[in-house]
Image: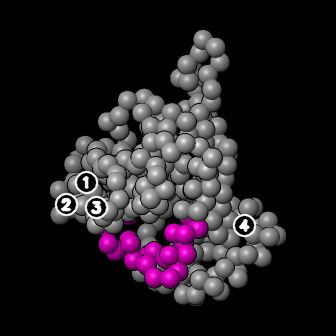
Amino acid sequence: MDSLNINPQYLETADIETSSPDYATRFSGRVGSYFLEVQSSITLQLLAGQEKKSVLDVGGGHGQLAGPLAEHGFPVTVTGSHDICGERLAERMQGVSYAYQTCDNLHLPFADNSFHTVISFRLLPHVDRWQELIAEMCRVAQHCVILDYPDQRSFNILYRMLFTIKKAMEGNTRTYSMFSRAQLRQAFFKNAFTVTACKPEFFWPMVLHRKLKHPGLSKALETPAQLLGLTHLFGSPVILQSKAIQPAAGKTREEIG
């Protein structure tokens, strides 16, 4: 990343890597398509039943959600911390209407409540100032914020012990932070948002599915876990939705927070 001439004023630039061709290989092939299908399906379910209103995808140069949302009629704007994020996104969004802006993801160049929904995927666990990221997403969101994160209450509890093995198996994995649901609920409440849904994607570790290389087998493993409630209790990554708390008469959202 050093050769990209990164703006030194941008404190968090993890989205440059998640927008890269190398990172895209983690979601290539049949198993990668399975991962993205589960992710987009849950996200679209959370947005179901509402008008096709504006969506801001923070650090979404990977295009994993911008494409499906735009194809379903949502007006989508994507931010990235370097122009290269927009260039890579353009390759994946050919023929699809969207907007892109390079900016500081911790200081978004948009007014308060500019977008109906704000999303961010593959970013939160890779930034140090995650509380600031959540606060900024809440600031520009009028209705709700949706993001994904690795849950502590899962196989991720073995993360530190097994990271070396995981890296040897996957090659291009990287370190990340884990979160508890209570931790994120508190962070959102401070910004006058309340968590309304937590949707785990998989019970079994994604590295296992990558090594199986067989979506049918992966689904066969995941289905019993879903039916038994194991995915709900211990699944990861989790797609979290948080909605703005409606201000009481005479109060602003800032006063509630």
Lateral position of residue 21 relative to residue 113, left or right: left
- Residue type highlighted by circle 2: Leu
Which residue, as the protein is rendered here, is positioned at the far top? 250
Which residue is found at the position 28% from the left and 47% from the top?
Answer: 101
Residue under label 2, please give it: 4
Lateral position of residue 141 relative to residue 21, left or right: right
Q: Is residue 118 visible?
A: no
Which label sits on residue 249?
Answer: none
Report the predominant secondary structure element of the magenta stretch: helix
Residue under label 4, please give it: 231
Closest to the observer: 120 or 99? 99
Find out whether the residues at labels 2 and 3 contact each other: C-beta distance under 8 Å: no
- Within-10-Å neighbours for mark 4: few <14, some 14–19, many 20+: many
Q: Which residues are magenta?
A: 17-39
Lateral position of residue 47 relative to residue 98, left or right: right
How far apart in space, not on screen, are marks 3 and 4 (Cα)?
35 Å
- Residue type highlighted by circle 3: Ala
Residue under label 1, please give it: 82
Q: SS at mark 4?
A: helix
Residue 64's place in the image compared with 242, above or below, is: below
Q: For the residues carrying marks 2 and 3, which lies nearer the camera in this image?
A: 3
- Within-10-Å neighbours for mark 1: few <14, some 14–19, many 20+: many
Residue 54's place in the image compared with 40, above or below, is: above
- Residue type highlighted by circle 1: His
Find out whether the residues at labels 1 and 3 contact each other: C-beta distance under 8 Å: no
Residue under label 3, please give it: 90
- Within-10-Å neighbours for mark 3: few <14, some 14–19, many 20+: some
